[in-house]
Image (tube, rainbow, N blue to C red):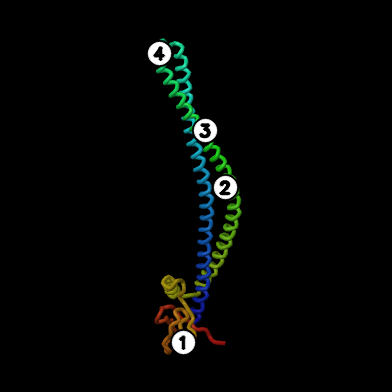
Amino acid sequence: MRKNLFLLEELQALDLKIDGRHAERQTLLERLAELDRQVEEARCAVEEKRGEIARLEEEKQGLEGDLATENDNIDRSEARQKEIKTQKEYQAVVKEVTAARKLKGELEEQILQKSAQIEELSADVAARAADLASLEENMASRKAEVQADLDRLDQEIATEAEAKASTAKSIPSSLLKRYEALRQRRQGVAIVEARAGNCAGCNMNLPPQLYNSLFRGDDLVLCPHCQRMLVVHPEG
Protein backbone atom coordinates (compact mmCIF):
# COMPACT_ATOMS: atom_id res chain seq x y z
CA MET A 1 0.00 0.00 0.00
CA ARG A 2 2.82 2.42 0.84
CA LYS A 3 4.22 2.16 -2.70
CA ASN A 4 0.76 2.94 -4.11
CA LEU A 5 0.44 5.93 -1.81
CA PHE A 6 3.77 7.29 -2.98
CA LEU A 7 2.59 6.84 -6.57
CA LEU A 8 -0.62 8.67 -5.71
CA GLU A 9 1.49 11.54 -4.35
CA GLU A 10 3.35 11.69 -7.67
CA LEU A 11 0.05 11.57 -9.52
CA GLN A 12 -1.39 14.33 -7.36
CA ALA A 13 1.66 16.52 -7.94
CA LEU A 14 1.09 16.16 -11.67
CA ASP A 15 -2.63 16.78 -11.30
CA LEU A 16 -2.02 19.94 -9.32
CA LYS A 17 0.45 21.15 -11.95
CA ILE A 18 -2.09 20.45 -14.67
CA ASP A 19 -4.82 22.19 -12.64
CA GLY A 20 -2.58 25.20 -12.25
CA ARG A 21 -1.80 25.32 -15.94
CA HIS A 22 -5.49 25.05 -16.83
CA ALA A 23 -6.21 27.96 -14.49
CA GLU A 24 -3.39 29.94 -16.09
CA ARG A 25 -4.74 29.01 -19.51
CA GLN A 26 -8.21 30.27 -18.57
CA THR A 27 -6.68 33.55 -17.42
CA LEU A 28 -4.91 33.90 -20.77
CA LEU A 29 -8.13 33.16 -22.66
CA GLU A 30 -9.89 35.84 -20.62
CA ARG A 31 -7.06 38.22 -21.44
CA LEU A 32 -7.51 37.48 -25.14
CA ALA A 33 -11.23 38.12 -24.81
CA GLU A 34 -10.52 41.41 -23.03
CA LEU A 35 -8.13 42.51 -25.79
CA ASP A 36 -10.79 41.69 -28.38
CA ARG A 37 -13.37 43.58 -26.31
CA GLN A 38 -11.19 46.70 -26.18
CA VAL A 39 -10.70 46.66 -29.95
CA GLU A 40 -14.39 46.00 -30.59
CA GLU A 41 -15.38 48.80 -28.21
CA ALA A 42 -13.10 51.25 -30.06
CA ARG A 43 -14.40 50.02 -33.41
CA CYS A 44 -18.02 50.42 -32.32
CA ALA A 45 -17.27 53.96 -31.12
CA VAL A 46 -15.92 54.82 -34.58
CA GLU A 47 -18.92 53.24 -36.30
CA GLU A 48 -21.29 55.07 -33.97
CA LYS A 49 -19.70 58.42 -34.87
CA ARG A 50 -19.86 57.53 -38.58
CA GLY A 51 -23.52 56.74 -38.09
CA GLU A 52 -24.02 60.19 -36.55
CA ILE A 53 -22.29 61.77 -39.54
CA ALA A 54 -24.53 59.81 -41.94
CA ARG A 55 -27.60 60.95 -40.01
CA LEU A 56 -26.46 64.59 -40.11
CA GLU A 57 -25.67 64.33 -43.84
CA GLU A 58 -29.17 63.02 -44.44
CA GLU A 59 -30.70 65.80 -42.38
CA LYS A 60 -28.54 68.34 -44.22
CA GLN A 61 -29.67 66.99 -47.58
CA GLY A 62 -33.28 67.30 -46.44
CA LEU A 63 -32.69 70.91 -45.40
CA GLU A 64 -30.97 71.64 -48.71
CA GLY A 65 -33.99 70.18 -50.51
CA ASP A 66 -36.29 72.43 -48.46
CA LEU A 67 -34.02 75.42 -49.23
CA ALA A 68 -34.19 74.70 -52.95
CA THR A 69 -37.98 74.54 -52.69
CA GLU A 70 -38.11 77.90 -50.91
CA ASN A 71 -35.82 79.48 -53.51
CA ASP A 72 -38.20 78.24 -56.20
CA ASN A 73 -41.13 79.63 -54.26
CA ILE A 74 -39.41 83.00 -53.96
CA ASP A 75 -38.58 83.07 -57.68
CA ARG A 76 -42.18 82.22 -58.63
CA SER A 77 -43.60 84.79 -56.21
CA GLU A 78 -41.29 87.51 -57.51
CA ALA A 79 -42.21 86.62 -61.09
CA ARG A 80 -45.91 86.92 -60.20
CA GLN A 81 -45.35 90.44 -58.87
CA LYS A 82 -44.95 91.67 -62.45
CA GLU A 83 -48.41 90.39 -63.33
CA ILE A 84 -50.26 91.67 -60.24
CA LYS A 85 -52.90 94.32 -60.88
CA THR A 86 -54.37 95.00 -57.46
CA GLN A 87 -52.79 96.29 -54.26
CA LYS A 88 -54.34 93.45 -52.27
CA GLU A 89 -52.76 90.81 -54.45
CA TYR A 90 -49.43 92.65 -54.33
CA GLN A 91 -49.45 92.74 -50.51
CA ALA A 92 -50.30 89.02 -50.37
CA VAL A 93 -47.36 88.17 -52.63
CA VAL A 94 -45.01 90.42 -50.66
CA LYS A 95 -46.12 88.62 -47.51
CA GLU A 96 -45.41 85.26 -49.16
CA VAL A 97 -41.95 86.37 -50.25
CA THR A 98 -41.14 87.79 -46.82
CA ALA A 99 -42.18 84.54 -45.11
CA ALA A 100 -40.25 82.50 -47.66
CA ARG A 101 -37.10 84.61 -47.22
CA LYS A 102 -37.35 84.24 -43.44
CA LEU A 103 -37.69 80.46 -43.78
CA LYS A 104 -34.81 80.50 -46.26
CA GLY A 105 -32.60 82.26 -43.72
CA GLU A 106 -33.55 79.75 -41.03
CA LEU A 107 -32.81 76.84 -43.37
CA GLU A 108 -29.44 78.30 -44.33
CA GLU A 109 -28.55 78.70 -40.64
CA GLN A 110 -29.54 75.09 -39.92
CA ILE A 111 -27.49 73.88 -42.89
CA LEU A 112 -24.47 75.78 -41.58
CA GLN A 113 -24.96 74.20 -38.15
CA LYS A 114 -25.21 70.72 -39.66
CA SER A 115 -22.08 71.36 -41.74
CA ALA A 116 -20.17 72.47 -38.64
CA GLN A 117 -21.34 69.39 -36.73
CA ILE A 118 -20.34 67.13 -39.62
CA GLU A 119 -16.92 68.77 -39.83
CA GLU A 120 -16.37 68.39 -36.08
CA LEU A 121 -17.51 64.77 -36.07
CA SER A 122 -15.40 63.97 -39.16
CA ALA A 123 -12.31 65.21 -37.36
CA ASP A 124 -13.27 63.14 -34.32
CA VAL A 125 -13.77 60.05 -36.49
CA ALA A 126 -10.42 60.55 -38.19
CA ALA A 127 -8.68 60.75 -34.81
CA ARG A 128 -10.59 57.73 -33.47
CA ALA A 129 -9.86 55.72 -36.62
CA ALA A 130 -6.14 56.48 -36.26
CA ASP A 131 -6.26 55.43 -32.62
CA LEU A 132 -8.14 52.28 -33.61
CA ALA A 133 -5.52 51.36 -36.21
CA SER A 134 -2.77 51.88 -33.63
CA LEU A 135 -4.73 49.87 -31.06
CA GLU A 136 -5.31 47.00 -33.51
CA GLU A 137 -1.61 46.89 -34.33
CA ASN A 138 -0.67 46.93 -30.66
CA MET A 139 -3.30 44.34 -29.78
CA ALA A 140 -2.12 42.04 -32.56
CA SER A 141 1.33 42.02 -30.99
CA ARG A 142 -0.06 41.44 -27.49
CA LYS A 143 -2.39 38.68 -28.72
CA ALA A 144 0.54 36.97 -30.41
CA GLU A 145 2.39 36.98 -27.07
CA VAL A 146 -0.64 35.55 -25.27
CA GLN A 147 -1.09 32.91 -27.97
CA ALA A 148 2.56 31.91 -27.58
CA ASP A 149 1.95 31.45 -23.84
CA LEU A 150 -1.15 29.38 -24.61
CA ASP A 151 0.82 27.16 -26.98
CA ARG A 152 3.50 26.69 -24.33
CA LEU A 153 0.90 25.78 -21.71
CA ASP A 154 -0.80 23.33 -24.05
CA GLN A 155 2.53 21.61 -24.63
CA GLU A 156 3.27 21.47 -20.90
CA ILE A 157 -0.22 20.12 -20.17
CA ALA A 158 0.21 17.45 -22.83
CA THR A 159 3.60 16.42 -21.42
CA GLU A 160 2.27 16.28 -17.85
CA ALA A 161 -0.85 14.39 -18.97
CA GLU A 162 1.44 11.79 -20.54
CA ALA A 163 3.41 11.47 -17.31
CA LYS A 164 0.14 11.25 -15.37
CA ALA A 165 -1.17 8.44 -17.59
CA SER A 166 2.11 6.56 -17.19
CA THR A 167 2.01 6.89 -13.38
CA ALA A 168 -1.68 5.95 -13.19
CA LYS A 169 -1.01 2.63 -14.94
CA SER A 170 0.84 1.38 -11.86
CA ILE A 171 -1.97 2.23 -9.43
CA PRO A 172 -4.93 -0.12 -8.81
CA SER A 173 -8.09 1.17 -10.51
CA SER A 174 -10.14 1.00 -7.31
CA LEU A 175 -7.62 3.23 -5.53
CA LEU A 176 -7.56 5.62 -8.48
CA LYS A 177 -11.35 5.99 -8.38
CA ARG A 178 -11.22 6.75 -4.68
CA TYR A 179 -8.43 9.26 -5.25
CA GLU A 180 -10.38 11.04 -8.03
CA ALA A 181 -13.53 11.19 -5.90
CA LEU A 182 -11.58 12.71 -3.00
CA ARG A 183 -9.91 15.23 -5.31
CA GLN A 184 -13.30 16.49 -6.42
CA ARG A 185 -14.50 16.93 -2.85
CA ARG A 186 -11.27 18.36 -1.41
CA GLN A 187 -10.26 21.13 -3.81
CA GLY A 188 -7.90 18.90 -5.76
CA VAL A 189 -5.98 17.50 -2.76
CA ALA A 190 -6.82 13.88 -2.01
CA ILE A 191 -3.64 12.64 -0.33
CA VAL A 192 -1.59 14.48 2.29
CA GLU A 193 1.33 13.79 4.53
CA ALA A 194 0.95 13.02 8.21
CA ARG A 195 3.67 14.74 10.26
CA ALA A 196 4.27 14.82 14.01
CA GLY A 197 0.88 13.33 14.71
CA ASN A 198 -1.01 15.85 12.59
CA CYS A 199 -2.78 15.77 9.21
CA ALA A 200 -1.09 18.24 6.86
CA GLY A 201 -4.38 18.68 5.01
CA CYS A 202 -6.53 20.01 7.84
CA ASN A 203 -3.88 20.51 10.56
CA MET A 204 -5.91 18.43 13.03
CA ASN A 205 -4.37 16.00 15.52
CA LEU A 206 -4.57 12.35 14.56
CA PRO A 207 -5.40 9.62 17.12
CA PRO A 208 -2.06 8.12 18.23
CA GLN A 209 -3.05 4.58 17.29
CA LEU A 210 -4.10 5.67 13.79
CA TYR A 211 -0.93 7.71 13.34
CA ASN A 212 1.27 4.81 14.40
CA SER A 213 -0.51 2.46 11.98
CA LEU A 214 0.64 4.67 9.10
CA PHE A 215 4.25 3.60 9.63
CA ARG A 216 3.36 -0.02 8.90
CA GLY A 217 1.98 1.02 5.51
CA ASP A 218 -0.27 -2.01 5.26
CA ASP A 219 -3.66 -0.36 4.77
CA LEU A 220 -5.19 2.78 3.35
CA VAL A 221 -5.76 5.25 6.19
CA LEU A 222 -7.98 8.32 5.96
CA CYS A 223 -7.88 11.38 8.17
CA PRO A 224 -10.91 11.14 10.48
CA HIS A 225 -11.40 14.91 10.16
CA CYS A 226 -11.01 15.76 6.44
CA GLN A 227 -11.23 12.23 5.00
CA ARG A 228 -8.08 12.67 2.90
CA MET A 229 -5.70 9.77 2.34
CA LEU A 230 -2.71 9.86 4.68
CA VAL A 231 0.89 8.96 3.96
CA VAL A 232 4.07 9.19 6.03
CA HIS A 233 7.62 9.57 4.77
CA PRO A 234 10.57 7.89 6.50
CA GLU A 235 12.62 10.39 8.47
CA GLY A 236 16.24 11.06 7.57
Residue 132 tag number? 2
Q: Is residue 209 left or right of residue 46?
A: left
**Disc 4 residue type?**
Gln
Q: Nearer the viewer, mark 4 or mark 1?
A: 4
Query: How many angstroms separate mark 4 from mark 1 (CA)?
Result: 120 Å
Question: How many residues crowd around disc 4 within 10 Å: few (fewer than 14), some, or many (20 or more)?
Answer: few
Label 3: element kind:
helix
Question: Residue at label 4?
Answer: 87
| Closer to us: 87 or 176 | 87
- Disc 3 or 4, which lies upstream in sequence? 4
* Residue displayed at 52% across by 67% down: 20
Q: Nearer the viewer, mark 3 or mark 4?
A: 4
* Residue displayed at 55% across by 37% down: 119
Q: Is residue 97 left or right of residue 155?
A: left
- Disc 2 or 1, which lies upstream in sequence? 2
- Disc 1 or 3, which lies upstream in sequence? 3
- Disc 4 or 1, which lies upstream in sequence? 4
Query: How many angstroms separate mark 2 from mark 4 (CA)?
Result: 66 Å
Reply above or below: 85 against 17: above
Question: Residue at label 3?
Answer: 112
| Closer to us: 142 or 196 | 142
**Disc 1 residue type?**
Gly
Query: How many angstroms separate mark 1 from mark 3 (CA)?
Result: 88 Å
* Residue displayed at 52% across by 73% down: 13
Question: How many residues crowd around disc 2 within 10 Å: few (fewer than 14), some, or many (20 or more)?
Answer: many
Question: Residue at label 1?
Answer: 197
Query: How many angstroms separate mark 3 from mark 4 (CA)?
Result: 37 Å
Q: Residues at badges 1 and 3 in contact (C-beta under 8 Å)? A: no
Label 1: element kind:
loop
- Disc 2 or 4, which lies upstream in sequence? 4
Q: Nearer the viewer, mark 1 or mark 3?
A: 3
